Amino acid sequence: MPADQIQNTKAFESDISYLKNRQRLLIDLIKSKHKDFYVWMVENGIDPTDLKAYFAGIAVALMVMFTTKLTPISSIRGISGNSQVIEVKVQAIQKEELIGKSEEEKGELVMRRYGHVIDKAASRYSLDPNLIFATVMVESGGNTYASRYEPHLNDSSYGLGQIMFSTARWIGFEGSREDLYDPEVNIDLIGRYYFKNKTMFGDDLTVEQLVTSYNAGNPFARPTAGHIQKFQKWFNKASSIRS
């Protein structure tokens, strides 16, 4: 074998060895820093040492996980390998599912469908999950695709928590308006908004003050008439609906 070919072969082998070491380091990093994501890959039959078939989807997921300010969402859409498509997604409540249901039945549906997402967000931001649940019920009644134009603010509110786009941007959201209809994104932003207010105004804010901040912009403002009463109704019901 010519000397230059031998040299090229050695360089290639050196590159392969380097890449394998980097791969091992990346897998170790995922295991230690993002255990849930690693478990998700294993449970869905994705070999972390052979990501070629999943490269496009995994690359996007890792980019989001390591660079964005948003908390990573457990579902990764559109990751395909060979003939299968992997989709782990919370099933959004459709408006038709709410038709004909009583208020209590709507609350039960929201808890069944989104309860685990609410619990995760509450744990992430050290909040009472009933706070997030009651916020969803007061703001949208469980209507995933609710929207409302706010003329005095020249903005619109979106989704389960009726998050205004400008408010979402303020707390670090970098997605589109349409993304606010995603239940997991919206519920996370509800928790993040409350967390932001606790950070700004003090960790000792009462539930009523937190709800006032969500409704009126800060915990010491005057909330919309009847808003606190509606919230308290759902907040008090949450535990019995959950059980």
Image (cartoon, rainbow, N blue to C red):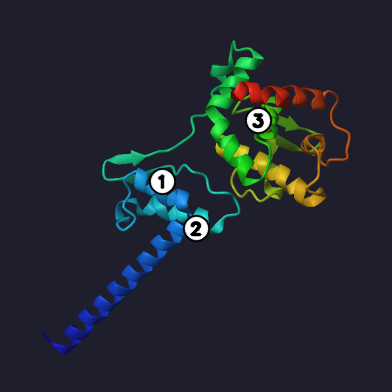
Residue 4 visible within the image? yes
Residue 166 visible within the image? no
Determine whether the residue tagged by mark 3 lies in a helix, strand or loop. Answer: helix
Q: Earlier in the sequence, mark 1 or mark 2?
A: 2
Q: Examine the rendered structure and indicate whether residue 58 appears above or below residue 165.
A: below
Q: Residue furthest bottom?
A: 3
Quadrant that contains the C terminus: top right
Q: Based on the displayed image, in which of its 4 quarters is residue 229 positioned?
A: top right
- Classify mark 1: residues with Cα within 10 Å, few (<14), some (14-19) or many (20+): some
Residue 87 image offset from top left, x and y in percent: 40, 38
The residue that appears at 28% across and 72% down in the rendered structure is 16
The residue that appears at 26% across and 45% down in the rendered structure is 82
Tell me which amino acid carries mark 2.
Lys
- CA gap, disc 1 and disc 2: 14 Å
Q: Examine the rendered structure and indicate whether residue 197 appears above or below residue 111.
A: below
Q: Earlier in the sequence, mark 1 or mark 3?
A: 1
Determine whether the residue tagged by mark 2 lies in a helix, strand or loop. Answer: helix
Which of the numbered marks, if any, corresponds to residue 33? 2
- CA gap, disc 1 and disc 3: 26 Å
The residue that appears at 34% across and 51% down in the rendered structure is 54
Q: Residue furthest top?
A: 100
Q: Examine the rendered structure and indicate whether residue 79 appears above or below residue 14.
A: above
Tell me which amino acid carries mark 3.
Phe
Determine whether the residue tagged by mark 1 lies in a helix, strand or loop. Answer: helix
- Classify mark 3: residues with Cα within 10 Å, few (<14), some (14-19) or many (20+): many
Which of the numbered marks, if any, corresponds to residue 133? 3
**Residue occupied by mark 1:** 40
